[in-house]
């Protein structure tokens, strides 16, 4: 009979996520993951099938924690939710830059298919939520079209944060976009 495990799944995901966020899927080594989580290879593989599974579960954990923030579902719906999402959404883990899901898109060619599917579903959900917030404001343009532009802006903003953009610069860009969007 094996030894009882001395870790919990959520704790491992919390500690593995920054490793994948910093190094990406391809460059996150098993040694890095062992060191960060405090769990050896056999322990990790008793809980996760392989590195791919650990990555997918870390991505799922990240997306679920982002959803729990309710940035786009808070009442009342409207421009305020979108602005809050753009200012707070790209970075929800202390010390990390950008959005983990967006950063992961750079490796689509080598990501596990389940990870690509999770990211695609998340982006589709985000677009629907953004559009729902826009519809409440009765824009002149189609809400879906504006939502597409905002989601593309979010992607660019998330990537740009990796260049060490200051919080003030990001907030200014969001303020400028929101000023334009409110007129559409």
Image (cartoon, helix red, strand yellow):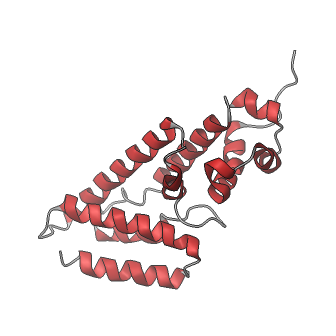
Q: Looking at this rendering, what residue extends furthest in the top direction?
A: 1
- The spot of residue 145 in percent (x, y) is 20, 62
How many marks overall? 0
- The spot of residue 119 in percent (x, y) is 45, 47
Q: Nearer the viewer, residue 149 or 86?
A: 149
Q: Nearer the viewer, residue 14 or 52?
A: 52
- The spot of residue 118 in percent (x, y) is 45, 42
Left or right, residue 67 beside residue 56: left
Residue 85 visible from this viewpoint? no
Residue at 76% over, 43% down: 30
Vertical placement of 161 versus 15: above or below? below
- Quadrant position of the C terminus in the picture: bottom left
Q: Quadrant of residue 110?
A: top right
Residue at 62% over, 35% down: 53
- The spot of residue 17 in percent (x, y) is 65, 51
Vertical placement of 181 versus 4: above or below? below
Q: Nearer the viewer, residue 35 or 8?
A: 35
Q: Nearer the viewer, residue 79 or 86?
A: 86
Q: Quadrant of residue 178?
A: bottom left
Residue 112 visible from this viewpoint? yes
- Quadrant position of the N terminus in the picture: top right
Residue at 72% over, 43% down: 12
Residue at 57% over, 70% down: 162
Vertical placement of 78 versus 125: above or below? below
Q: Looking at this rendering, what residue extends furthest in the left direction?
A: 140
């Amino acid at each position: 009979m094996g030894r009882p495990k001395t870790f919990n799944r959520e704790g491992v995901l919390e500690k593995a996520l920054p490793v994948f966020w910093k190094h990406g899927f391809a460059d996150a080594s098993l040694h890095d993951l062992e060191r960060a989580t405090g769990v050896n290879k056999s322990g990790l593989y008793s809980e996760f099938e392989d590195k791919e599974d650990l990555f997918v579960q870390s991505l799922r954990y990240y997306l679920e924690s982002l959803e729990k923030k309710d940035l786009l579902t808070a009442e009342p719906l409207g421009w305020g939710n979108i602005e809050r999402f753009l200012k707070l959404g790209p970075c929800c883990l202390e010390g990390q830059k950008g959005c983990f899901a967006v950063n992961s898109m750079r490796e689509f060619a080598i990501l596990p298919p389940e990870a690509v599917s999770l990211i695609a579903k998340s982006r589709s959900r985000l677009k629907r939520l953004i559009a729902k917030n826009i519809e409440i404001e009765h824009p002149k343009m189609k809400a879906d079209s504006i939502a597409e532009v905002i989601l593309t802006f979010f992607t660019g903003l998330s990537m740009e944060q990796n260049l060490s953009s200051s919080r003030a610069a990001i907030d200014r860009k969001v303020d400028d976009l929101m000023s334009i969007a409110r007129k559409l």
